[in-house]
Image (cartoon, rainbow, N blue to C red):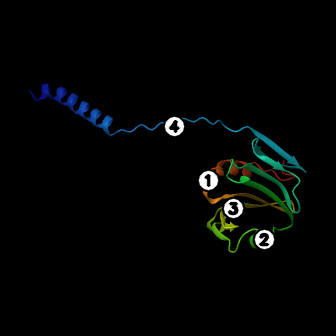
Amino acid sequence: MVIRLLPPLMTCLLWASATHAQEGARVVTRVVTDSAPAWKTWRSDGMSIYHPVTWTVDGSATGDTLVVLQKPGDAGSGPTAATVAVQGFDGAAPTVASRLAGVADGDVEVIDGEANGNKRTEYRYKVDGVGFLRLEEVLPSGGRTFVLSYVAPEESFNEHLFLAEAMLNSFTPPGSR
């Protein structure tokens, strides 16, 4: 008798388990409408960096800045949503304080840096009362030092971070091919 009750009992337990799972299960769906961005390559003096075609390129930068790539802001959000820049220095790069002098309002806070074993350093600072985050990598190459940076307002920093990191990772200094 115990043997005959076992299959119906197992069926009942499986049905109850499945019913409970259906009641407690939550299905989350997400419709992804945007596609992977198309990419272009900026090249100059043996250097290159990939960037999304929707970003604007300012290759006529002044001073030590070699190129500035900007994600245009949406209507009403300001002129620029995010910026990736490449600066080149003969020898060592200037200190962070001197690189950000005249840009930041007051103190620059190091959020995460090379002291923690990271290859990149992240800073927080304000410009005209607006909080910004800056992700920066210092890359020595052939007697020069390149400073690669991604800057965006704090509230939208993570929105473009994956693209910015892909761009920073794609940078090729002169003579490295």
- Name the residue tied to disc 3: 134
Crowd tier of the residue under label 4, counting other residues whose Cα lies within 10 Å: few below 14, some 14–19, many 20 or above: few
- Name the residue tied to disc 4: 30
Determine the residue positioned at 60% across, 57% down: 155
- Callout 1: helix, strand or loop? loop
Work out whether 83 lies above or below 128. Answer: above
Determine the residue positioned at 32% across, 40% down: 24
Mark 1, mark 2: which one is toward the viewer? 2
Q: Amino acid at mark 1?
A: Asn
Q: Give the quadrant of residue 145.
A: bottom right
Q: Amino acid at mark 3?
A: Arg
Mark 3 or mark 2: name the one nearer the start of the chain: 2
Crowd tier of the residue under label 2, counting other residues whose Cα lies within 10 Å: few below 14, some 14–19, many 20 or above: few
Mark 4, mark 2: which one is toward the viewer? 2
Tell whether 6 sits left or right of 45. left
Mark 3, mark 2: which one is toward the viewer? 2
The quadrant of the picture occupied by the N terminus is top left
Q: Amino acid at mark 4?
A: Arg
- Name the residue tied to disc 1: 158
- Which label number is shown at residue 33? none
Q: Give the quadrant of residue 61.
A: bottom right
Q: Amino acid at mark 2?
A: Gly
- Callout 2: helix, strand or loop? loop
Mark 1 or mark 3: name the one nearer the start of the chain: 3
Mark 3 or mark 4: name the one nearer the start of the chain: 4
- Callout 4: helix, strand or loop? loop
The alpha-carbon separation of the residues under discs 3 and 4 comes to: 30 Å
- Name the residue tied to disc 2: 102
Determine the residue positioned at 80% across, 56% down: 86
The alpha-carbon separation of the residues under discs 1 and 4 comes to: 19 Å
